[in-house]
Amino acid sequence: MANELLLRADDISYSQGKRLILDRVSFELRRAQITTVIGPNGAGKSTLTNVVTGLIDNYSGKVERSPELRIGYLPQKVYVNTLMPLSVERLLRLTRQSSAAEIEQALTQSEVAYLRHRQVRSLSEGELKRVLLARTTLGKPDLIVLDEPTAGVDVSGEIRMYQLIGELRDQLQCAVLLVSHDLHLVMSQTDQVLCLNQHLCCSGLPESVSQHPEYLALFGRQAAESIAVYAHHHDHEHDVSGALETHEHD
Amino acid sequence: MNMTEWLDDFLLRAIFAGLIMVVIAAPMGCLMVWQRLAFLSDTLGHAAVLGVGLGLMLQLAPIFGVLAVALVIVFSLSRVSSFNSALSETTLAIISHTGLAGGIILVGLLPGPAVNLEAILFGDLLATTSADLLNLLLTTALLLVLLLRYWRAFVAVSVSREIAQAEGIEVRRIQFLMYIMIALLVAVMMKVMGVLLIAAMLVIPTTSARLFSRSPEQMVYISGLYGLAALGGGITSSFHFDWQTGPAIVVSATLLLLLTLGITRLVKPDLE
């Protein structure tokens, strides 16, 4: 069911010692929607994803998840051990059994099927991120949580990565919760923006968030204008080679 | 009992003890190298001297003293912080050398005939008794059962704590189990390798195997083969040239590593 409500967070607060990290944050995640969390460093973005994935459970407030919600998670910092010989295929099978066909499909969706038998330690950072993205799609997740999936990826790779995330959403019909620094790149794929700075400064469609006074105070007018420019070209996007690609929007 | 029988017997016991050690050192060594815990085994080994001293003082078998000291260290460390931080490395060094120093003083103070410190420090494989053998066998069996039961979790935690945690593995519990297993391992390997050389047997064959393994399990099996070859070389040279067995095993393992390095360089010059 499209737009099915998968997760509702109500008045979530979380402190670490005396420091308040999340202050009464509420939001909803719906099937087939991409929600992007933006905010300055230390705004509580990763903490918010940890609340969603269940890694943090001593928050106040309430999180309602749809029953048997399956979550795929790509953490912000993945230190992958280079001392261990490990193939990409094995990395995908690390914590659960998946069939060869499922592995192939997941890698193909993230455009890294050719890496299947490579050793993880020989991958570039961009390749590793793609493989880990493929990993999150295994086991038919209802929700994919991606914490800065493009850190360490070059700009053209970044753009392609965000397109891929959009395609995954379409193919898997899952919700996506995305933490990102570059709203102007995520823009065309995003359905809902949560602008976070401990509290939820503003939320909604990308265009409206980019005009919100609190957003402007946080990111400055220039950032807002760069978004406006992208918003203006909402009906097309550049592929990696720079050629224009028209894009049907609903 | 004639001379030949006696010879056979002690040599057989030594070989059997060595084989058991190789079997358990391969998977444990791999896990410790993956999780960068080799230094912990070294610390527990050094501090084991204190355990030997305490055990003898209380008129217990030294292995119980060693196990007690190792468990106390592991419990206290797991309460403070992660082993990977720089602080912990300093902490480990302090514990390691204080344990060794305190243990040597304690052993020196013991009344009665002088304790063979050399056997404690460098092992005395050829003096393995039936009781030693039984200890080694039982502990190894216990460790193997735990390894088989939790292997997937151990490997996942070694690859990435974050991913393992997010996908429902209780990382802290798994790591704590790992530390206890290392304490057990040190207590039994001490007899064979001596407290100072335990870490070598966990690290050197594993490093050789890492050079051309393609999967975690393959690395374990190949480490086992390297351990076996080192054991063979060590016992043989010990028997024929009267070298101390523990050091002879370590030197054999290192020679094999150098040989492997040389060959892999020749075959695949681009290998890191």
Image (tube, coloured by chain):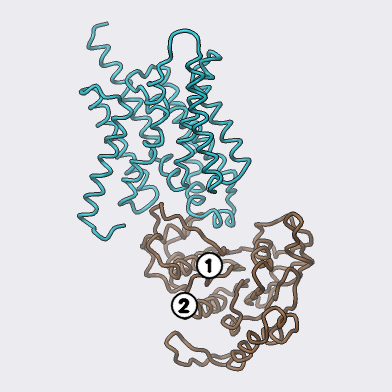
Residue A79 at what x, y percent from top left?
A: 50, 58
- Where disc 1 sits, the SS reads loop
In the rendered image, which quarter contains the N terminus of chain A?
bottom right
Which is nearer the eye, A139 or B56?
A: B56
Q: CA distance from mark 2 to mark 1?
A: 19 Å
Residue at 59% in and 67% down: A147
Amino acid type, callout 1: Thr
Q: Quadrant of residue A19?
A: bottom right
Q: Is residue B205 above or below residue A139?
A: above
Residue B9 at what x, y percent from top left?
A: 29, 16
- Mark 2 or 1 closer to N-term? 1
Same chain for labels 2 and 1? Say yes or no.
Answer: yes
Q: Is residue B37 above or below residue A199?
A: above
For chain A, give the colour.
brown
In the rendered image, which quarter contains the C terminus of chain A?
bottom right
In-image side of A20 versus B136 (left or right): right
- Disc 1: which residue: A137
Kindly report which numbered mark, 2 or 1, lies closer to the viewer in this rendering.
Answer: 2
- Disc 2: which residue: A157
The local crowd at label 1, few if under 14, some if 14 to 19, many if 20 or more residues have their Cα within 10 Å, is many
In-image side of A184 versus B5 (left or right): right
Label 1 chain ID? A
Residue B26 at what x, y percent from top left?
A: 38, 39
Q: Is residue B105 above or below residue B266?
A: above
- Where disc 2 sits, the SS reads helix
Residue B244 at what x, y percent from top left?
A: 30, 24
Amino acid type, callout 2: Gly
Q: Which chain is cyan?
A: B
